[in-house]
Image (tube, coloured by chain):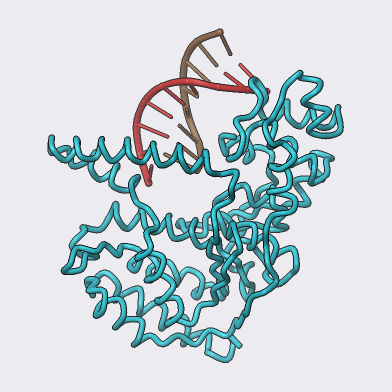
Chain colours: A cyan, B brown, C red
Amino acid sequence: MGNADLRSLASLEDVPFEELSDSVVAVDAHNWLYRYLTTTVRFTSDEKYTTSDGTEVANLIGVVQGLPKFFEHDLTPVFVFDGGVTELKDDEVEQRREAREAREEKLEAARERGDSKAVARLDSQTQRLTDTILTTTREVLRLLDVPVVDAPAEGEAQAAHMARQNVVDYVGTEDYDALLLGAPLTLRQLTSSGDPELMDFQATLDHHGITWEQLVDAAILMGTDFNPGIDGVGPKTAIKLVKEHGDLWGALDARDAHVEHGDRIRELFLDPAVTDDYDLDLAVNPDLDAAREYVTGEWEVDEGEVARAFEHIEASVVQTGLDDWA
DNA sequence: GTGATGTC
DNA sequence: GACATCACT
């Protein structure tokens, strides 16, 4: 789709952190983790997060440095982890695997010619959420008593579902697909400096005078993670087509075009696999000593890299008062 | 991934 | 208005 295409349809506004106080955010854990992981790898020398047996746990630095952002603004995060991969996405997964292998070859070449700038850039692109990264992230979240939910499939879909059920106030992700999943209010840029950006689902529909189904149909016409999209159809044309012809099928007929598995792609956004079977305890009582020991002791992360972050966590939790988390 | 820029 | 490319993160 070229995510910029969906962005141009979305109702967005910057919102100061102060206005988000005391709310709960269902964070797309993989999306969030990946952002901190790539930043950590780019700006931190690898010996700071490499164990004596060579395992890289840059995620532990990223997680510990990223969490204070929530606590300091009285936001309670609920990290929603992905379950299985959607079947339709197999082609996409395969393409990504090939792209990754291509990058790894480039990375090796850059290392050989001593191009440190290229190495740093490619290094961050080749990061993956390995089993070690996922399990150590979950363990540090457990020690810090941060709520975690396991999605049956896509974490983003589960997060959107929880927001639709009013279990949480916001979905936190950079991904514009949250809009297609019907997440009422999505916070973007929770990982960057500056104020978050609020993406409003209903305002988006109202602005274009379309239904949720029509928004999804427009996105399919532009192209999604699951289909390439119709040539020559961008945001403007897509909205025009769904309004003129009612839905995806009408629009495709009018263009004499075809989308493979169009009906199933629609369902992935309108009716994704989600669950109501999860335990959510929003009271956060972190065991800071245990978390510190886990990160710097067990996983040998450089203490200097995380000392300040742990102080921030401690200060924000003490300042808020543990009772406020209950 | 995002924004800017240029071409059709 | 769509899309390709580039610089930067």
* Residue beneath the point at 62% across and 34% down: A227
Q: Is residue A250 above or below residue A8?
A: above
Quadrant assignment, res A148:
bottom right
In the image: residue A170, left or right of residue A289: right
Q: Quadrant of the N terminus of chain A?
A: top right
Q: In this view, does A111 lie to the left or right of A318?
A: left
Asked whether, in this view, residue A36 is left or right of residue A205, the answer is left
In the rendered image, the vertical position of residue A19 relative to residue A129, given as above or below: below
Nearest the viewer among A137 and A266 is: A266
Q: Which residue reaches farthest bottom? A: A323
Residue A159 sits in which quadrant?
bottom right
* The C terminus of chain A: image quadrant: bottom right
Residue at the image position 74 percent from the left and 50 percent from the top: A270
Q: Nearer the viewer, residue A172 or A226?
A: A226
Whole-percent x and y of residue A24?
Answer: 62, 72
Q: Position of residue A158 (x, y in %)?
A: 64, 62
Residue A311, percent from left and from top: 35, 80
